[in-house]
Amino acid sequence: MAKKIYITRRIPEIGIKMLQDKGYELDINPKDRPLKEKELVRALGKKPYDAVLCLLTDQIGAKIFDSVPTAKIFANYAVGFNNIAVEEAKKRGVMITNTPGALTDTVAEHTVALILSLTCRIVEGDSFTRKGKYEGWAPMHLLGTDLKGKTIGILGAGRIGARVAHIVKNGFGMNVIYYDVARNEEFEKEYEAKYFGAVDEVLKEADVVSIHVPLLDSTRHLINKERLAMMKKTAYLVNTSRGPVIDEVALVDALKNGVIRGAALDVFENEPKLAKGLAKLDNAVITPHIASATEKARGEMAILASTNIIAFFEGKTPPNIV
Ligand code: NAD
């Protein structure tokens, strides 16, 4: 009998085709939005699915596992897997996979775009010009910040953090300092990066702080009111990791009161909602969780997610077990 897979929202065709070519039976959520938990439970209860391909917008926990006890693999279409109760899955012998690497360059490029948007005041300048306010060149108008010789503080020197360090070190001549739970000597050598054993030390010294840690209990509100106060008044904060790593209410407050100079966010604490006041701030640049949104990255993520399922069904070890 053909293996049955439930896909919680349409992903790029290339991944779907890989699964169809294997003769698997696919059911795809027909709505172009995430399913609510109740809807997902109902959908999964319809057939004895052997696998679920899920997204970061799906909260996968005991209720979902109960609704489809036949599914022994959940392939997450994301590198982050904070949306899945991994320990609960382990207890039940359910394998979880993710899609690391496929989006590293893409997310790093978006991060650098956000940094430049802040330091070159791109969004403010664009909005000013479109509003018809531009009346000619002025010596003191919309002054930004040069990156050359400045210091970037990377929080989480993994795949994406390292790629960001590569671009800003080699492209702009920035100095690199970092904090990570695991010291990374290769990273230090490659980017002449200075390691700090405490996040506070990085915050005090960096001109730009860029966050690349996974969302864990230990990283929730890693950046809070006290830590924002440790940063330089002239510093910028950029987050393309996960929203809850920053206390967003405290950040809005800090931006309003000049505690730091600016912030750029691709992810939010209560997505898709924004903290009150955030959207009104000129010194904030915000994008709607699109750091990995290129055709190449999303296509490669689809290939990886499908590869994990195919390997599992064929009795091989999936390449990206969490
Ligand atoms: P990675 O696993 O390669 O790197 C994460 C790094 O964080 C590792 O070096 C790890 O040691 C470090 N780390 C873990 N816990 C820490 C802690 N408590 N304090 C400091 N450092 C800690 O992951 P990656 O591929 O670089 O991705 C990083 C994160 O980016 C993902 O977990 C995901 O949540 C996020 N992400 C977001 C988007 C987006 O669309 N905005 C896309 C891809 C990934």
Image (cartoon, rainbow, N blue to C red):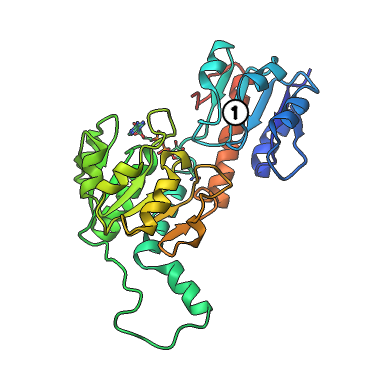
Query: Vertical placement of 2 versus 241: above or below?
Result: above
The amino acid sitting under disc 1 is Ala
- Residue at image x 67%, y 35%? 18
Is 115 situated left or right of 126 in this image? Answer: left
Q: Secondary structure at mark 1?
A: strand
Using the rendered image of the protein, determine whether residue 188 is visible from the camera's viewpoint. yes
- Residue at image x 49%, y 34%? 80
Is 216 situated left or right of 201 in this image? Answer: right
Q: Position of residue 204 (x, y in %)?
A: 22, 47
Q: Could you say which is closer to the camera, residue 207 or residue 106? A: 207
**Quarter of the image where one finds residue 22:** top right
Query: Vertical placement of 40 versus 165: above or below?
Result: above
Question: Which residue is denoted by mark 1 in the rendering?
Answer: 75
**Which residue in the rendered view is the most extreme toward the bottom?**
136
Is 71 situated left or right of 228 in this image? Answer: right
Q: Position of residue 205 (x, y in %)?
A: 20, 49
Q: Position of residue 274 (x, y in %)?
A: 53, 50
Is 241 situated left or right of 143 in this image? Answer: right
Q: Could you say which is closer to the camera, residue 253 or residue 313? A: 253
- Residue at image x 60%, y 39%? 302
Q: Quadrant of the N terminus?
A: top right
Using the rendered image of the protein, determine whether residue 68 is visible from the camera's viewpoint. no
